[in-house]
Image: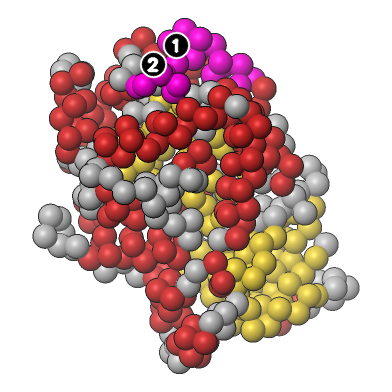
C-alpha cells in the first residue's frame, strides 16, 4: 500500500470536479497485481484510516487522473505539422506515403517507442490508437505498450479501396488478419483490440460487412473509425453509399454502432444522427486541434448535450497539432465558443478536464476503471507542478477559485506541467 499527499482532483458521477487542497491518495494492488485507488479525499479524514501507511509528501503539487486520448494515430507521429489544403489532399500527399513504411516491423517499433514516450511526457496514460493496414504495425504497438504496462487500445486499419499501393489491403485477408490479432492481443495484460475501418470511403461493402460480423462475434472489443469530418467527405460517402440515410448510418447498417464504438470528429451530424449515437451507445472523439488545422468545422457541443450522446477529447495526431492535453482542452474551448455555424457556449474548465479524463474513459466503456481517482479505479495518475513556469506560478497563485486554477493550467500549460506519471502497473 502506498499513499501520496498533495492537492487532489477527481470527478463525481455528475461530471463535476472534486478538489482537495490538501488531499491524500491511497493505492494498493488488486488481485491482478495492479495498483488501484483504495481511498482518496481530504488528508485529515483519509490519513486517520491508514495510520501505518508511509506517505510521500507532494504538497505544492496537484495529483490528477492520467489523461485519456480518445483518438490518435501513432503512425502519424512524423506527419504532425504537415501543410495541406484539407483532409483529402493531406491524406494523399503525406499520410498514406508515410504509413506505407509500417510494413517494416522494426521501423514501426521505433515510431511506437517514440510515440509512447511523447504520451508519457504529456501525461497521457491511455490512448485509443490507429495503427496502419499492416498487421506488424499492430504487433509493434502492442509490444511497446505491454513493455510499459500501459492500458492501450489499437487495431489494424481496414482499407481495401480508394487507397494507394502500400496501404491498401485485400478484403478477405484483412478480416483474417483482424481476427488473428484479436485472438493474439485482446485482453492480454492491459491491452485491448479495436476493429478499425479507416473510414467508410476506403472500405468496400464486403469489408464493412466483415468488420460488423467480427464486432458481433467479439462483443468485448472496441470499434473505431472516422465520421462526418468535413463536407467533401460527407458528399463522397453519399455518392458511395446512396442507400444509407447518412454517413453515420453507413456504419449502423453494417452493425458498427454500439457501446465501445468510438467515431472521431462527428462534426457534420444531424439530429437523427446524434439520436442514433445515443441509442446505440457509440461515442464521439472530439478532435479540436485537428479540426481547426484542417478547417473541417466545429463540433456542436450544445447539440451533443441536447441529444445525450457520449463524447470525449482527442489529440488526433497527426492531423492534430499537439500531443498536449492542455492544448487540446484549450482548442476545445475555442470550438465551443464559436457561434457563427452553431450555438456557441463557454465550456467550463472542469468540463474540459472531464472530457479528457473521466469523460473519455466513459466513452470507452471504461468509466470507473480509468480516468478518475475514485475508489476502485486503476491508479494511473499524473503529478502536476502548477509553478512549472514563471507565468504559471504567477497566475495559479492568484486563482481565487478552482475554475480559475484549472483554466490557468489549460491556457498556459504544456508538457512542463507534467512532473511525473504513475501507472497502475508500477
Q: Are marks 2 and 1 in contact (CB under 8 Å)?
A: yes
Q: Give the answer, above or below, for where 223 lies relative to 387.
A: above
Q: Position of residue 305 (x, y in %)?
A: 28, 53
Is residue 167 on the magenta stretch?
Answer: yes
Residue 293 within the magenta-colored segment of the rendering: no
Name the residue beneath numbered marker 2: 160
Residue 136: x percent and y percent? 61, 25
Q: Residues within 10 Å of mark 2 (few under 14, many from 20)?
A: many
Give x and y (percent) for residue 25.
Answer: 70, 69
The quadrant in which residue 408 appears is bottom left
Q: Secondary structure at mark 2?
A: loop
Instruction: Say which mark, if any, is on residue 170.
Output: 1
Q: Residue at x 45, y 21 (%)?
A: 166
Lateral position of residue 230 relative to residue 155, left or right:
left
Q: Is residue 164 left or right of residue 151?
A: left
Residue 400 or 230: which is nearer the viewer? 230
Quadrant housing residue 332: bottom left
Magenta residue span: 163-183
Q: Residue at x 61, y 21 (%)?
A: 181
Q: Nearer the viewer, residue 198 or 425?
A: 198
Q: Depth check: 64 or 36 in front?
A: 64
Quick check: can you spot residue 395? yes
Amino acid at each position: 500500500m502506498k499513499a501520496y499527499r498533495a492537492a487532489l482532483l477527481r470527478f463525481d458521477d455528475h461530471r463535476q470536479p472534486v478538489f482537495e487542497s490538501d488531499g491524500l491518495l491511497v493505492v494498493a494492488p488488486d488481485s491482478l497485481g495492479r495498483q488501484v485507488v483504495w481511498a482518496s479525499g481530504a488528508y485529515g479524514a483519509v490519513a486517520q484510516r491508514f495510520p501505518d501507511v508511509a506517505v510521500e509528501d507532494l504538497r505544492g503539487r496537484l495529483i490528477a487522473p492520467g489523461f485519456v486520448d480518445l483518438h490518435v494515430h501513432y503512425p502519424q507521429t512524423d506527419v504532425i505539422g504537415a501543410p495541406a489544403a484539407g483532409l483529402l489532399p493531406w491524406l494523399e500527399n503525406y499520410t498514406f506515403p508515410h504509413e506505407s513504411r509500417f510494413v517494416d516491423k522494426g521501423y514501426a517499433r521505433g515510431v511506437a517507442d517514440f510515440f509512447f514516450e511523447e504520451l508519457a511526457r504529456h501525461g497521457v496514460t491511455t490512448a485509443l490508437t490507429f495503427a496502419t493496414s499492416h498487421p506488424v504495425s499492430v504487433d509493434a504497438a502492442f509490444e511497446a505498450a505491454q513493455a510499459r504496462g500501459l492500458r492501450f487500445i489499437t487495431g489494424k486499419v481496414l482499407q481495401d479501396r480508394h487507397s494507394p499501393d502500400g496501404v491498401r489491403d485485400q478484403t478477405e485477408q484483412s478480416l483474417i488478419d483482424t481476427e488473428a490479432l484479436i485472438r493474439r492481443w485482446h485482453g492480454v495484460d492491459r491491452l485491448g483490440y479495436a476493429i478499425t475501418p479507416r473510414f467508410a470511403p476506403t472500405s468496400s461493402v464486403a469489408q464493412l460487412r466483415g468488420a460488423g460480423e467480427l464486432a458481433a462475434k467479439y462483443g468485448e472489443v472496441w470499434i473505431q473509425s472516422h465520421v462526418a469530418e468535413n463536407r467533401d467527405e460527407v458528399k463522397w460517402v453519399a455518392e458511395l453509399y446512396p442507400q444509407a440515410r447518412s454517413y453515420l448510418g453507413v456504419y449502423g447498417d453494417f452493425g458498427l454502432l454500439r457501446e465501445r464504438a468510438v467515431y472521431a470528429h462527428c462534426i457534420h451530424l444531424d439530429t437523427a444522427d446524434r439520436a442514433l449515437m445515443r441509442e446505440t451507445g457509440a461515442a464521439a472523439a472530439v478532435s479540436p486541434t485537428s479540426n481547426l488545422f484542417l478547417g473541417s468545422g466545429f463540433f456542436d457541443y450544445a447539440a451533443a448535450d441536447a441529444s445525450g450522446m457520449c463524447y470525449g477529447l482527442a489529440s488526433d495526431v497527426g492531423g492534430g497539432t499537439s500531443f498536449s492535453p492542455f492544448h487540446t482542452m484549450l482548442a476545445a474551448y475555442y470550438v465551443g465558443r464559436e457561434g457563427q455555424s452553431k450555438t456557441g457556449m463557454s465550456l467550463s474548465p472542469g468540463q474540459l478536464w472531464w472530457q479528457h479524463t473521466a469523460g473519455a474513459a466513459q466513452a470507452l466503456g471504461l468509466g470507473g476503471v480509468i480516468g478518475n481517482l475514485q475508489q476502485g479505479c486503476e491508479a494511473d495518475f499524473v503529478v502536476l507542478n502548477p509553478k512549472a513556469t514563471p507565468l504559471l506560478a504567477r497566475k495559479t497563485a492568484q486563482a481565487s477559485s478552482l475554475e480559475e486554477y484549472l483554466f490557468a493550467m489549460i491556457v498556459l500549460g504544456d508538457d512542463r506541467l507534467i512532473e511525473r506519471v504513475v501507472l497502475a502497473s508500477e
